[in-house]
Every structure is written in structure tokens, then in C-alpha cells.
């Protein structure tokens, strides 16, 4: 996959055409997922592809933001065995298949749900694994616009839903999300270019997040890249972990394709980097 071009163009789609995706393309997605990228190869994870008539009526009052279920011709349900960091692993793997779908001309969107076991019961899914993601799938019926609900970091009581024309105009800048050596020391894009990291950070800032909170911050400390995530009332623990997996994929995919192989390690670093109380170091990688 050409991650750079796909990340630059992908949008979250909430309005779908009634037209169904061909069985051939659905099979391509399934095959891609079975062989796709993972944060942890030892976590057993699988995807189910279901049609609207199997999902929408059963979940329209129990899934989606404020129980407003997204109507789509297809849905992906991701199941995972329960291990350490299995939710972050789902965020990573699910976003990867969503990028692949976009490359094939297929739109998608994360759908919130309250109770994975209830979802399995309503959809008659027989599995010991946990439901870790529900994603709508189909062809975009509103090709030029992206809907964002934004929560403002410095005024968390303020939220706003708006439509924008692309997936970058509402994003924080590189200096806002990348620091050098310690918290608050804004990175110089020219220095990041010399280190071979700028392209990865440009792509990472396009990553989707819960309510477009853009909760991630990076600290570059010589050969170590540290990831910190903000906690607030607008995202629960599950959503924070999904956001962690997603941003790790966006960054790692570009690094792997342009510079070198690297792998995230989840957990804290020995240094605290003067990270404020509402942020937590969730992982790091070494170049």
C-alpha cells in the first residue's frame, strides 16, 4: 500500500450510497486483514464482514454516537483475544484495513458501542473473543466533505461539529504536536527534516481520533521518539487505547516506507520529560 498518498487523502465517511461493495473487493479486504500489520503478532484477532440487513436494524438503538447508528451497506466487526494491549492492537490493525479500504475506493468510519457482549448477542456472533471494533463500510455519498466534532484542549467544555473540505485544515501544526528533548520545546520542522522524521509527523497529524481531539504529542530525544496521550472526559479508556493504536500505525507506516524499520514499545520511559498531569506517556520507539 502507498501509505503516504492514502493517509493524505482518507476521510471518515458517514453518508453512504446504497450500492454494495463487490464480493471481490470484500474478499481483498479480508485477505489483507488476515496478513496485515499488527502491534503484537501474538494476539489472535479476526474480522467479520456483514451486510446491512445483518447489522443495522439490530444495532440502530444501541450503537453509534448517542445511539445514532450509521447506516451503511456493510460493516466490519473486529474480534480479539484478551491480552495486554489488545485494544491498542485493534486500533492499529483496524485503521490499517480502513486505509486499505480507502485505497480500494471504499469509505469507512468507526462506530461507538457500549457493550461488546450485547453486540455479539444481537448479531448472533459465536466467539470467545472480545468485540473490539465496529466499523461502517461502503461508497462515499458525500465525496468532498468531512464531518468533524472537535473538542478544544484549552477549553474542554467547548465542542463544535462542523463540515470541512479536507482532512488537514482542522489539524494542529507540527510545532503544536512535536517537542524536542522535553515538553514544551517546540520542534523545528527543518531539524525534523534533517533527522528524516518530518514526513512521518506530517502524516501522523492526520490520524483520526475520538471527537477529533488530537490528543497525542511526541517528544524527540535523539534516537528515541516518545508518545504521550491526553486524558479527558471526552474519551473513555477504550477510546484512548484505540487512539493510541491508530497514531502508532500512522507514524510507523511512513517511517517503515521512507527510512527504516521500527517498532513501538508500549509503556512508560525512564525519563518523564516534564509531561503535564493530564498527559501520560503510553509508548516509545527507538530509531
Image: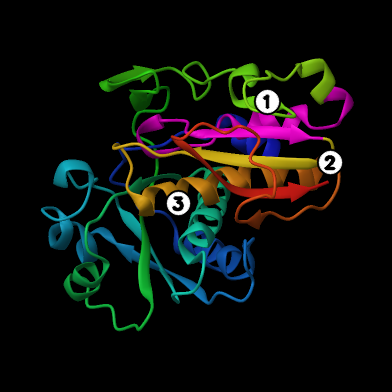
Inter-mark Cα distance, 1 to 3: 23 Å
Q: What element carries label 1?
A: strand
In the image, is residue 241 above or below residue 24? Answer: above
Look at the picture and state if 224 lies above or below 171: below
> Which range of residues does the magenta coloring cover?
193-221
Front residue of this view, candidates 96 and 132: 132
Give the Cα distance between marks 2 and 3: 26 Å
Residue at the disc numbered 3 = 242
Q: Which colour scheme is used?
A: rainbow
Q: Tags 2 and 3 in contact by the CB under 8 Å rule?
A: no
Q: Do the residues labelled 1 and 3 touch (CB within 8 Å)?
A: no
Q: In this view, does 257 lie above or below 76?
A: above
Q: Residue 39 bears which disc, if any?
A: none
Residue assigned mark 1: 179
Q: Position of residue 195 (x, y in %)?
A: 87, 30
- Is residue 3 found left or right of 54 in the rendered image? right
Amino acid at each position: 500500500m502507498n501509505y503516504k498518498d492514502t493517509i493524505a487523502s482518507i476521510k471518515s465517511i458517514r453518508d453512504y450510497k446504497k450500492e454494495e461493495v463487490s464480493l471481490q473487493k470484500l474478499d481483498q479486504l479480508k485477505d489483507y486483514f488476515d496478513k496485515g500489520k499488527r502491534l503484537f503478532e501474538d494476539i489472535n484477532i479476526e474480522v467479520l464482514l456483514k451486510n446491512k440487513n445483518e447489522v443495522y436494524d439490530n444495532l440502530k438503538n444501541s450503537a453509534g454516537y448517542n445511539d445514532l447508528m450509521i447506516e451503511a451497506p456493510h460493516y466490519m466487526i473486529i474480534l480479539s483475544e484478551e491480552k495486554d494491549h489488545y485494544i491498542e492492537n485493534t486500533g492499529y490493525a483496524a485503521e490499517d484495513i480502513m486505509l486499505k479500504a480507502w485505497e480500494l475506493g471504499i469509505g469507512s468510519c468507526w462506530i461507538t458501542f457500549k457493550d461488546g457482549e450485547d453486540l455479539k448477542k444481537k448479531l448472533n456472533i459465536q466467539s470467545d473473543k472480545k468485540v473490539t471494533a465496529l466499523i461502517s463500510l461502503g461508497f462515499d455519498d458525500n465525496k468532498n466533505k468531512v464531518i468533524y466534532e472537535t473538542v478544544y484542549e484549552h477549553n474542554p467544555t467547548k465542542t463544535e461539529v462542523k463540515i470541512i473540505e479536507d482532512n488537514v485544515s482542522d489539524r494542529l501544526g507540527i510545532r503544536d504536536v512535536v517537542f524536542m528533548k522535553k515538553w514544551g520545546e517546540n520542534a523545528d520542522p527543518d531539524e525534523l527534516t534533517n533527522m528524516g522524521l518530518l514526513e512521518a509527523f506530517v502524516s501522523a497529524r492526520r490520524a483520526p481520533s475520538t471527537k477529533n481531539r488530537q490528543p497525542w504529542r511526541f517528544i524527540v530525544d535523539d534516537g528515541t521518539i516518545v508518545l504521550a496521550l491526553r486524558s479527558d472526559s471526552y474519551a473513555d479508556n477504550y477510546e484512548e487505547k484505540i487512539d493510541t493504536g491508530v497514531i502508532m500505525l500512522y507514524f510507523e507506516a511512513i517511517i517503515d516506507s521512507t527510512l527504516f524499520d521500527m517498532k513501538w514499545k508500549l509503556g512508560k520511559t525512564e525519563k518523564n520529560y516534564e509531561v503535564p498531569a493530564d498527559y501520560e506517556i503510553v509508548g516509545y520507539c527507538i530509531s
